[in-house]
Amino acid sequence: MSKTKDTKTIFKPASASRVEISELMLPSHSNFSGKIHGGYILSLLDQIAFACASKHSGSYCVTASVDTVDFLKPIEIGELVTMKASINFVGNTSMVVGIRVEAENIQNGAVKHCNSSYITMVAKDDKGKSVKVPGLVLESKNDLKRFFKSIKRMELKKERQKYSSQLDYTVDQVIHELEGYNVKIDL
């Protein structure tokens, strides 16, 4: 089921580009409160998104946007972090990579879901020009749900952008709207 008329379009299953990495969290990865620094996790997320998107597209890929990063639970020093990435959606030159982050206490085997992220990657050629990516074969109901949810997230993002572009108010128009917020206005 393809929306394109191009009979030469290549399709790849999501399973062909899935990537999983695991890394032990060290004290050097921690922040001042002794938890693993969110910035370090973001760096790993970007790396696995690159690997997954490049594997699907067969091209060098760049990060176009980090659409969602939900930090759900803190990660402790000494836990084994596993990131699982898959292509959830493909457009013409872009792909949405979904990433699930889990942390395992290697002493007792307890596993917790710590992060869910969606990163949009764009395939590029040697000259930096965007290139067409293979279509996506949805092999399971889960693949189908991920693809559909990606479409809905993109629609919501477009609505937010449209709404934000309409938010051009003067101070006099909005100052009363700030009542009840934790702010002191000292103009």
Image (cartoon, grey):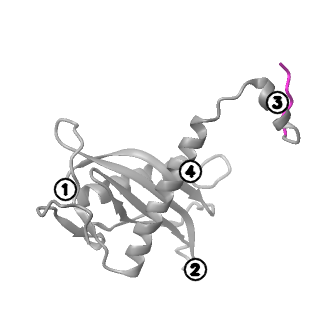
Residue 28 in sight in this render? no
Which of the two labelled residues, at mark 3 and mark 2, occupies the earlier sequence position? Answer: 2
Front-lying residue, 102 or 180: 180
Q: Do the numbered discs 4 and 2 sit on residues whose CB atoms are within 8 Å?
A: no
Report the amino acid beneath label 1.
Gly
Q: Quadrant of residue 2?
A: bottom left
| Distance (Cα) linking label 3 and label 2 | 54 Å
- Neighbourhood count class around disc 4 (C-alpha, 10 Å): few under 14, some 14–19, many 20 upward: some
Numbered range of the magenta stretch: 182-187
| Distance (Cα) linking label 3 and label 4 | 34 Å
Camera-side mark, 2 or 1 = 1
Report the amino acid beneath label 3.
Ile
The total of numbered circles placed on residues is 4
Dot 2 corresponds to which residue? 108
| Distance (Cα) linking label 4 and label 2 | 24 Å
Q: Which residue reaches farthest top?
A: 187
Q: Residue at left 54%, top 62%?
A: 115
| Distance (Cα) linking label 4 and label 1 | 29 Å
Where is the N terminus found, in terms of image quarters? bottom left
Front-lying residue, 45 or 143: 143
Q: Do the numbered discs 3 and 4 sit on residues whose CB atoms are within 8 Å?
A: no
Which of the two labelled residues, at mark 1 and mark 3, occupies the earlier sequence position? Answer: 1
Residue 38 tag number: 4
Camera-side mark, 3 or 4 = 3
Residue 166 in sight in this render? yes
Dot 1 corresponds to which residue? 58
Residue 108 in the image, given as x and y percentages of width and height: 57, 80
| 134 with respect to 81 (left or right) | left
Which of the two labelled residues, at mark 2 and mark 1, occupies the earlier sequence position? Answer: 1
Dot 3 corresponds to which residue? 175
Which of the two labelled residues, at mark 4 and mark 1, occupies the earlier sequence position? Answer: 4
Q: Residue 143 in magenta?
A: no
